Image (cartoon, grey):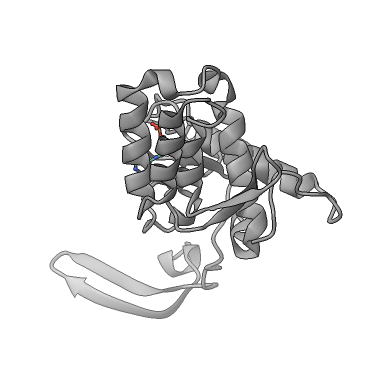
Amino acid sequence: MVEMTQAFDLLDVCYEQIGPDMLMSGSLQPIPDPTPIIPSENETLAIDPTVNPYEPSIIFFYKTWDPYGAFSNFSAHSIKMPEENGGNVTWSSVEHYYQASKFMGVSDSGAKDCIGKIKSAKSPEEAAKVGRSMQRLHPNLVRADWEDVKIDVMYSGLRCKFSSYPYLKSMLLATSGSVLVEASPHDLFWGGGREGEGLNYLGRLLMRLRSEFLGESSTSSESTCLAL
Ligand SMILES: Nc1c(N[C@@H]2O[C@H](COP(=O)(O)O)[C@@H](O)[C@H]2O)[nH]c(=O)[nH]c1=O
Protein backbone atom coordinates (compact mmCIF):
# COMPACT_ATOMS: atom_id res chain seq x y z
CA MET A 1 0.00 0.00 0.00
CA VAL A 2 1.27 3.55 -0.86
CA GLU A 3 0.91 6.05 1.92
CA MET A 4 0.13 9.72 1.19
CA THR A 5 3.54 10.68 2.63
CA GLN A 6 5.13 8.61 -0.15
CA ALA A 7 3.08 10.32 -2.88
CA PHE A 8 4.35 13.70 -1.68
CA ASP A 9 7.95 14.05 -0.63
CA LEU A 10 7.14 15.92 2.59
CA LEU A 11 9.47 17.10 5.29
CA ASP A 12 8.38 17.64 8.87
CA VAL A 13 5.14 15.72 8.46
CA CYS A 14 2.45 16.29 11.10
CA TYR A 15 -0.87 14.48 11.53
CA GLU A 16 -3.88 15.96 13.23
CA GLN A 17 -7.29 14.41 13.77
CA ILE A 18 -10.03 16.89 12.88
CA GLY A 19 -13.39 15.30 13.51
CA PRO A 20 -13.66 12.24 11.27
CA ASP A 21 -10.79 13.52 9.04
CA MET A 22 -7.04 13.33 9.31
CA LEU A 23 -5.13 16.55 8.44
CA MET A 24 -1.67 15.89 7.11
CA SER A 25 0.77 18.84 6.80
CA GLY A 26 4.44 19.29 5.93
CA SER A 27 6.87 21.01 3.55
CA LEU A 28 7.24 20.01 -0.09
CA GLN A 29 10.75 19.21 -1.32
CA PRO A 30 12.67 20.54 -3.10
CA ILE A 31 11.92 24.19 -2.38
CA PRO A 32 10.69 25.64 -5.69
CA ASP A 33 13.05 27.85 -7.71
CA PRO A 34 11.86 31.43 -7.14
CA THR A 35 13.35 32.64 -10.46
CA PRO A 36 10.49 33.99 -12.59
CA ILE A 37 9.87 32.31 -15.92
CA ILE A 38 9.58 34.96 -18.61
CA PRO A 39 7.55 33.65 -21.54
CA SER A 40 8.86 34.18 -25.05
CA GLU A 41 7.13 36.69 -27.36
CA ASN A 42 5.19 33.87 -29.08
CA GLU A 43 4.15 32.37 -25.75
CA THR A 44 3.05 35.80 -24.54
CA LEU A 45 0.82 36.21 -27.59
CA ALA A 46 -0.60 32.71 -27.05
CA ILE A 47 -1.37 33.50 -23.40
CA ASP A 48 -2.92 36.92 -24.09
CA PRO A 49 -3.43 37.98 -27.73
CA THR A 50 -4.26 41.55 -26.58
CA VAL A 51 -0.70 42.01 -25.32
CA ASN A 52 1.61 43.23 -28.07
CA PRO A 53 5.23 42.50 -27.14
CA TYR A 54 6.38 44.51 -30.16
CA GLU A 55 4.62 47.70 -29.12
CA PRO A 56 7.16 50.49 -28.66
CA SER A 57 7.16 52.66 -25.58
CA ILE A 58 5.85 56.19 -25.96
CA ILE A 59 7.38 59.22 -24.31
CA PHE A 60 4.96 62.11 -23.94
CA PHE A 61 6.09 65.66 -23.32
CA TYR A 62 4.30 68.98 -23.30
CA LYS A 63 4.75 71.34 -20.40
CA THR A 64 8.29 72.41 -19.57
CA TRP A 65 8.01 71.05 -16.03
CA ASP A 66 7.19 67.53 -17.30
CA PRO A 67 10.03 64.94 -17.08
CA TYR A 68 10.82 65.46 -20.78
CA GLY A 69 9.74 69.11 -20.74
CA ALA A 70 13.10 70.17 -22.20
CA PHE A 71 11.80 68.77 -25.53
CA SER A 72 9.08 71.43 -25.57
CA ASN A 73 9.62 74.49 -27.73
CA PHE A 74 8.69 76.50 -24.66
CA SER A 75 11.80 75.37 -22.76
CA ALA A 76 14.15 78.20 -21.88
CA HIS A 77 16.97 77.27 -24.25
CA SER A 78 18.18 80.16 -26.37
CA ILE A 79 19.33 79.54 -29.93
CA LYS A 80 21.55 81.56 -32.23
CA MET A 81 20.33 81.50 -35.82
CA PRO A 82 21.85 83.04 -38.95
CA GLU A 83 20.02 85.86 -40.73
CA GLU A 84 19.67 86.45 -44.46
CA ASN A 85 21.92 89.55 -44.28
CA GLY A 86 24.78 87.47 -42.94
CA GLY A 87 24.36 88.44 -39.30
CA ASN A 88 22.86 86.29 -36.62
CA VAL A 89 20.22 86.62 -33.94
CA THR A 90 19.84 85.00 -30.55
CA TRP A 91 16.28 83.93 -29.79
CA SER A 92 15.26 83.19 -26.20
CA SER A 93 13.60 79.89 -27.19
CA VAL A 94 12.67 77.85 -30.25
CA GLU A 95 9.16 79.23 -29.83
CA HIS A 96 10.43 82.81 -30.16
CA TYR A 97 12.29 81.87 -33.34
CA TYR A 98 9.37 79.87 -34.78
CA GLN A 99 6.76 82.58 -34.14
CA ALA A 100 9.02 85.37 -35.51
CA SER A 101 9.74 83.34 -38.64
CA LYS A 102 6.10 83.75 -39.67
CA PHE A 103 6.89 87.41 -40.47
CA MET A 104 10.40 87.09 -41.89
CA GLY A 105 11.17 88.17 -45.45
CA VAL A 106 8.04 90.36 -45.68
CA SER A 107 8.82 93.86 -46.89
CA ASP A 108 6.37 95.67 -44.67
CA SER A 109 7.33 97.64 -41.59
CA GLY A 110 4.39 96.00 -39.77
CA ALA A 111 6.06 92.60 -40.23
CA LYS A 112 9.31 93.95 -38.80
CA ASP A 113 7.39 95.31 -35.80
CA CYS A 114 5.91 91.85 -35.23
CA ILE A 115 9.36 90.30 -35.30
CA GLY A 116 10.63 92.92 -32.84
CA LYS A 117 7.72 92.33 -30.45
CA ILE A 118 8.21 88.56 -30.55
CA LYS A 119 11.96 88.90 -30.08
CA SER A 120 11.51 90.99 -26.94
CA ALA A 121 8.71 88.79 -25.54
CA LYS A 122 9.52 87.97 -21.92
CA SER A 123 8.56 84.29 -22.23
CA PRO A 124 7.86 81.64 -24.88
CA GLU A 125 4.18 81.84 -23.88
CA GLU A 126 4.17 85.57 -24.63
CA ALA A 127 6.03 84.99 -27.92
CA ALA A 128 3.39 82.42 -28.93
CA LYS A 129 0.56 84.73 -27.91
CA VAL A 130 1.94 87.67 -29.90
CA GLY A 131 2.83 85.54 -32.93
CA ARG A 132 -0.55 83.82 -33.05
CA SER A 133 -2.63 86.96 -32.54
CA MET A 134 -0.63 88.92 -35.17
CA GLN A 135 -1.04 86.05 -37.62
CA ARG A 136 -4.80 86.03 -36.99
CA LEU A 137 -5.28 89.81 -37.05
CA HIS A 138 -2.84 90.64 -39.86
CA PRO A 139 -2.58 87.65 -42.21
CA ASN A 140 -1.12 90.01 -44.86
CA LEU A 141 2.03 90.34 -42.71
CA VAL A 142 2.67 86.59 -42.72
CA ARG A 143 5.06 85.33 -45.38
CA ALA A 144 3.07 83.87 -48.29
CA ASP A 145 4.84 80.51 -48.21
CA TRP A 146 4.53 80.03 -44.44
CA GLU A 147 2.48 76.82 -44.62
CA ASP A 148 5.05 75.33 -47.01
CA VAL A 149 8.10 76.25 -44.97
CA LYS A 150 6.97 76.03 -41.36
CA ILE A 151 8.11 72.43 -40.89
CA ASP A 152 11.60 73.25 -42.21
CA VAL A 153 11.70 76.37 -40.02
CA MET A 154 10.83 74.31 -36.97
CA TYR A 155 13.37 71.68 -37.86
CA SER A 156 16.19 74.20 -38.21
CA GLY A 157 15.31 75.67 -34.80
CA LEU A 158 15.22 72.22 -33.20
CA ARG A 159 18.50 71.18 -34.79
CA CYS A 160 20.13 74.31 -33.45
CA LYS A 161 18.70 73.79 -29.96
CA PHE A 162 19.75 70.16 -29.63
CA SER A 163 23.16 70.80 -31.21
CA SER A 164 23.89 73.72 -28.89
CA TYR A 165 23.28 71.92 -25.60
CA PRO A 166 25.15 68.59 -25.29
CA TYR A 167 22.97 67.42 -22.40
CA LEU A 168 19.83 67.94 -24.52
CA LYS A 169 21.39 65.94 -27.33
CA SER A 170 22.23 63.13 -24.87
CA MET A 171 18.71 63.24 -23.50
CA LEU A 172 17.28 62.95 -27.00
CA LEU A 173 19.60 60.08 -27.92
CA ALA A 174 18.68 58.30 -24.68
CA THR A 175 15.08 58.06 -25.93
CA SER A 176 16.14 55.85 -28.87
CA GLY A 177 13.56 53.17 -29.51
CA SER A 178 10.72 55.22 -28.05
CA VAL A 179 8.10 57.17 -29.94
CA LEU A 180 8.09 60.87 -28.98
CA VAL A 181 4.74 62.61 -28.78
CA GLU A 182 4.00 66.23 -27.95
CA ALA A 183 0.97 65.66 -25.71
CA SER A 184 -0.86 68.81 -26.73
CA PRO A 185 -4.61 68.29 -26.38
CA HIS A 186 -5.33 71.29 -28.66
CA ASP A 187 -2.67 71.41 -31.33
CA LEU A 188 -3.49 68.71 -33.88
CA PHE A 189 -0.63 69.66 -36.18
CA TRP A 190 2.43 69.85 -33.92
CA GLY A 191 0.89 67.77 -31.15
CA GLY A 192 -0.61 64.31 -30.76
CA GLY A 193 -4.09 65.48 -29.69
CA ARG A 194 -6.18 64.19 -26.82
CA GLU A 195 -6.80 60.72 -28.30
CA GLY A 196 -3.78 60.40 -30.56
CA GLU A 197 -5.68 62.03 -33.44
CA GLY A 198 -3.03 64.75 -33.89
CA LEU A 199 -0.32 64.61 -36.55
CA ASN A 200 2.42 65.03 -33.92
CA TYR A 201 4.81 66.87 -36.22
CA LEU A 202 6.93 68.10 -33.33
CA GLY A 203 7.43 64.52 -32.09
CA ARG A 204 8.18 63.40 -35.65
CA LEU A 205 10.80 66.11 -36.16
CA LEU A 206 12.48 65.21 -32.87
CA MET A 207 12.59 61.56 -33.94
CA ARG A 208 14.03 62.59 -37.32
CA LEU A 209 16.65 64.69 -35.56
CA ARG A 210 17.43 61.78 -33.23
CA SER A 211 17.98 59.49 -36.25
CA GLU A 212 20.21 62.07 -37.88
CA PHE A 213 22.30 62.51 -34.74
CA LEU A 214 22.63 58.73 -34.44
CA GLY A 215 23.81 58.39 -38.03
CA GLU A 216 26.00 61.47 -38.05
CA SER A 217 29.76 61.46 -37.94
CA SER A 218 31.35 63.70 -35.33
CA THR A 219 32.74 65.95 -38.08
CA SER A 220 29.37 66.92 -39.53
CA SER A 221 28.75 70.64 -39.78
CA GLU A 222 25.81 72.43 -38.24
CA SER A 223 25.19 74.77 -41.17
CA THR A 224 22.10 76.50 -39.80
CA CYS A 225 23.25 76.89 -36.23
CA LEU A 226 25.90 79.03 -34.63
CA ALA A 227 27.75 78.42 -31.39
CA LEU A 228 26.07 80.27 -28.52
N1 LIG B 1 4.22 73.32 -25.77
C1 LIG B 1 3.17 74.16 -25.87
C2 LIG B 1 2.58 74.45 -27.15
N2 LIG B 1 3.03 73.85 -28.30
C3 LIG B 1 3.72 74.61 -29.32
O1 LIG B 1 2.95 75.62 -29.93
C4 LIG B 1 3.55 75.92 -31.20
C5 LIG B 1 2.54 75.99 -32.30
O2 LIG B 1 2.21 77.31 -32.47
P1 LIG B 1 1.21 77.80 -33.66
O3 LIG B 1 1.70 77.18 -34.94
O4 LIG B 1 1.31 79.28 -33.64
O5 LIG B 1 -0.14 77.31 -33.24
C6 LIG B 1 4.55 74.81 -31.45
O6 LIG B 1 5.85 75.27 -31.10
C7 LIG B 1 4.13 73.75 -30.50
O7 LIG B 1 5.17 72.88 -30.19
N3 LIG B 1 1.53 75.32 -27.19
C8 LIG B 1 1.03 75.93 -26.05
O8 LIG B 1 0.12 76.74 -26.13
N4 LIG B 1 1.58 75.65 -24.84
C9 LIG B 1 2.62 74.80 -24.68
O9 LIG B 1 3.09 74.58 -23.55
Q: 34 or 142, which is in the foreground?
A: 142
In x, y percent, where is residue 142?
45, 23
**Residue 4 image-quadrant placement:** bottom left
Residue at 35% in and 22% down: 138
Residue at 42% in and 58% down: 67
93 w.r.t. 138: above or below: below
Q: 149 or 117, which is in the foreground?
A: 117
Answer whether residue 133 is visible to the viewer in this image: yes
67 w.r.t. 129: above or below: below
**Residue 209 image-quadrant placement:** top right
**Residue 22 image-quadrant placement:** bottom left
In x, y percent, where is residue 28?
46, 71
Where on the image, by quarter, is ligand 1? top left
206 w.r.t. 193: above or below: below
Residue at 67% in and 37% down: 84
* Horizontal side, residue 23 vs residue 82: left or right: left
Residue at 54% in and 60% down: 36
21 w.r.t. 197: above or below: below
Q: 160 or 9, which is in the foreground?
A: 160
| Residue lying farthest to the left in this orientation | 19
